[in-house]
Amino acid sequence: MSNNNGTKEKMHAPGSFVLALIFLAWFMVVYFTQWLALSKNWTVY
C-alpha cells in the first residue's frame, strides 16, 4: 500500500466518471433543445 505522493498532482479521472460527465453533458444539451422546441409550440399566457 504505497502511495505515490507528490509525483503526480494531476487528477486522473476514471473511465466511468468520464462517461458519466459525457452523459450529463449530452442530457443537458437534449433537455435544452427540447425546452426550446416546447417553448415555441406552447404559448404561455
Image (spheres, rainbow, N blue to C red):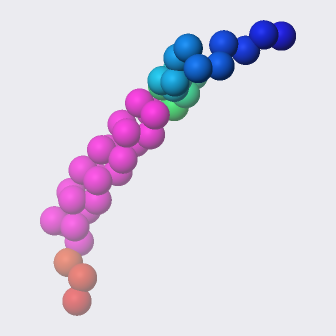
Residue 34 or residue 28, whichever sits in front: 28
Residue 13 lies left or right of residue 5; in this view the side is left
The answer to whether any part of residue 2 appears in the image is: yes
Q: Based on the displayed image, in which of its 4 quarters is residue 5 positioned?
A: top right
Residue 12 or residue 29, whichever sits in front: 12
Residue 32: x percent and y percent? 29, 53
Identify the residue at horizontal 21%, vertical 57% (top origin): 37
Residue 42: x percent and y percent? 23, 71
Residue 36 lies left or right of residue 16; in this view the side is left
Residue 40: x percent and y percent? 16, 65
Residue 1 drawn above or below residue 18: above
Quarter of the C terminus within the rendering: bottom left
Farthest residue toward the bottom? 45
Farthest residue toward the right? 1
Residue 18 drawn above or below residue 39: above
Farthest residue toward the front? 6
Badge count = 0
Is 34 colored magenta in this rendering? yes
Farthest residue toward the left? 40
Give the main secondary structure of the magenta stretch: helix
The answer to whether any part of residue 15 appears in the image is: no
Residue 28: x percent and y percent? 36, 47
The span shown in magenta is 21-42
Residue 2 or residue 24, whichever sits in front: 2
Residue 27 lies left or right of residue 12; in this view the side is left
Identify the residue at horizontal 83%, vertical 10% (top origin): 1
